[in-house]
Amino acid sequence: MNAGVTIIKTAAETALANTFSQARARLPGDGAIAAQRDAAFDVFAKEGLPHRRIEEWKYTDLRALMRDAKPLASPPDAAAKTAAKTAGALLRDIEARRLVFVDGAFVAELSDIASLEAGLTVRSLADALSGNDPALTTHLGKLAPGSDVAVALNTALMGDGAVIRIAAGSTIERPLHLLFVASEKPSATFVRSLVVVEEGARAMLIESHEGPAGSDYQVNAALELFVGDRAHVDHVKIITEGADALHVSTLAAAIGAKARFNSFTFTSGGAVVRNQLFLKFDGPGTVAAIRGATLLKGRQHADTTLVVNHAARDCQSREVFKTVLDDEAHGVFQGRIIVRPHAQKTDAKMMTRALLLSERAEADSKPELEIFADDVQCGHGATAGALDDELKFYLMARGIPAAEAEALLIQAFIGEAIEGIEHAGLREALMDSVVAWLGARG
Amino acid sequence: MALLEVENLHVEIDGKEILKGLDLTVNAGEVHAIMGPNGSGKSTLAYVLAGKADYVTTAGEVRFNGKNIFDMQPDERAAAGLFLAFQYPMEIPGVATMTFLRTALNAQRKKRGEPEYSTPEFIKRVRDTAAKLSIDPDMLRRAVNVGFSGGEKKRNEVLQMALLEPRLAVLDETDSGLDIDALKIVADGVNRLRGPQRSFIVITHYQRLLSYIVPDIVHVLSHGRIVKTGGKDLALELEARGYAEYQDEVLA
């Protein structure tokens, strides 16, 4: 026996393998989908959970951070559905069309799927998988990188999610809100959504993830988003998971020509969060703003990993990510801008800033530019530092107490990222939650 | 009782003694000018009074309204009526000037047990005061001091002073970097606030400002101590003869 090449499986890896072999037969989808699941699972079986020697996961060693794998969530019972009615409080003032998922399963009675606007089609992924929806064959798995183990696990175990199509030229006024809520029972959910926004259409898509504190549930969510030529899409992700939750989510988007694309991620919850964004500009003349604000305390760990692939000429992208770290929190930002050889006149600027409120907090930033075209304007910047004592003194000298002065400065810091959100109600809701976070800081 | 009493104040920064036994008494309603060469300790005095960290008081006492100021945080000193107009006002990106003014004013009023201003009341007060200081209302919508010219920053300091209505205002080289028109606007702003209950310490290198803000008492600060005190004519004398003799006096 050759002992040298034995791969030591962690408890979580073993449990995930068992979960898959037990669930495989009853997971939704026909032969082609089942084959896709098997292939994806093979990626995981070969690689195991990503760890610190995998460059992309250097700062988020999932193998070490994920001590076990929870059992797959069972369909929510009546109590879980009742409890889910109070979910989404942060966005209560926003007139969004809600699609509610409890423990990863679509719950029609909590969702607003009546009288859909013309051009809007909504379906649950479980339905689409069981019904061999042709949209799946053409789109599912086309954008999410199959080699990424988090994505592979999602593909292997995806149970439900949303499948949304917005027909060419339609403007959907009401934001669509995919609301994911975990019940009290600690379990694992694998949700996969597919959103196709056709040529010239316009929509706003909000994804929010929340759950109870004190439950070490696990969420793996992936969204594949197709933005057609001249479409205008605003994407917002709000991660306010319970304090003990593990959250891994992925946005993979392909954006057509002359489109407008804005993405904003707000993270304040979860014990371990990995937020992946894989964005590709497929057509010329597109303008995109990719932003994020993260507020962490205690021993929270949150990682934003961003890959912006300029594969077409004349596109402009702005990336702004801000992180506030208190106590022993750990914030990670990995941002890579790739400019392909033919993507001339690319204009891309990435900025990441971390504000450390404690001596024990840690910020890791890894901005990268990979430029293969010669006529481009690209830049990146990264800063990490404490609050400016001079500014704090100036505020205090005007009568503002220390805690309030700090709160004002932190709000200003994080506000720079939030201000870019076009939707006023959402901007206010997020600023309110920043204020609440600061209030809890005491 | 004097409003401000400074006795034998010794202050160090980074182990270097800057103030070396400074004495100063300011009564209600008085305007004191403190003049002196660069490096004599003028700004240090201003910062120590306002409560900036980094300065270590090794000896002496400072009482404001009878209370030991070293027992008070900077915000408590401000609420008690002490105001410092900064030589270099800070730029605070992301904090709107109106938010800043309102937070400061209401924090002080709250600490003094006074009711907070209503929004319309507050806005009216700011607008009226800003107009008197020729401050463009557009400036109030911008982040604190961000993109302001030197003169605008100084006028913004005076605006804050006028709104906060301190008992004692310390003006640290408020004249530096101002052209003559801006200087007159700032001086008018200060003069409007003069009254029997309000005192000023005007710190300046040049006599020029004192032609517009006429002091009751002029002090010469050199090598960390007040070496001469006189009436308003002392400022003119200094302008004519320079600081050389006072620097020599201490060295001798």
Image (cartoon, rainbow, N blue to C red):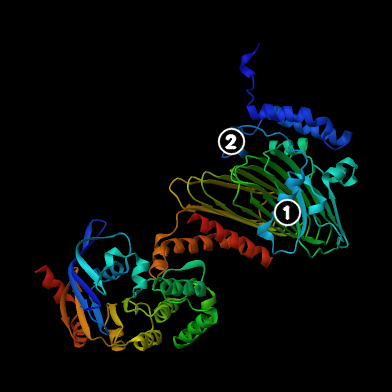
Residue at x 78% of width, y 28% of height:
A22
Which residue is labeled 1 in the image? A85
In this picture, residue A327 sits left or right of residue A76: left
Q: CA distance from mark 2 to mark 1?
A: 31 Å
Q: Position of residue B158 (x, y in %)?
A: 40, 80
Residue at x 47% of width, y 48% of height:
A327
Q: Are marks 2 and 1 on the same chain?
A: yes
Residue B86 showing in the rendered view: no
Q: Amino acid type of disc 2?
A: Leu
Mark 2 or mark 1: whose residue is earlier in sequence: 2
Q: Position of residue A435 (x, y in %)?
A: 55, 61
Quarter of the figure that contains the N terminus of chain A: top right
Above or below residue B238? Residue A339 is above
Foreground pick, B154 / A434: A434
Chain containing the residue with disc 2: A
Chain containing the residue with disc 1: A
Q: Amino acid type of disc 1?
A: Lys
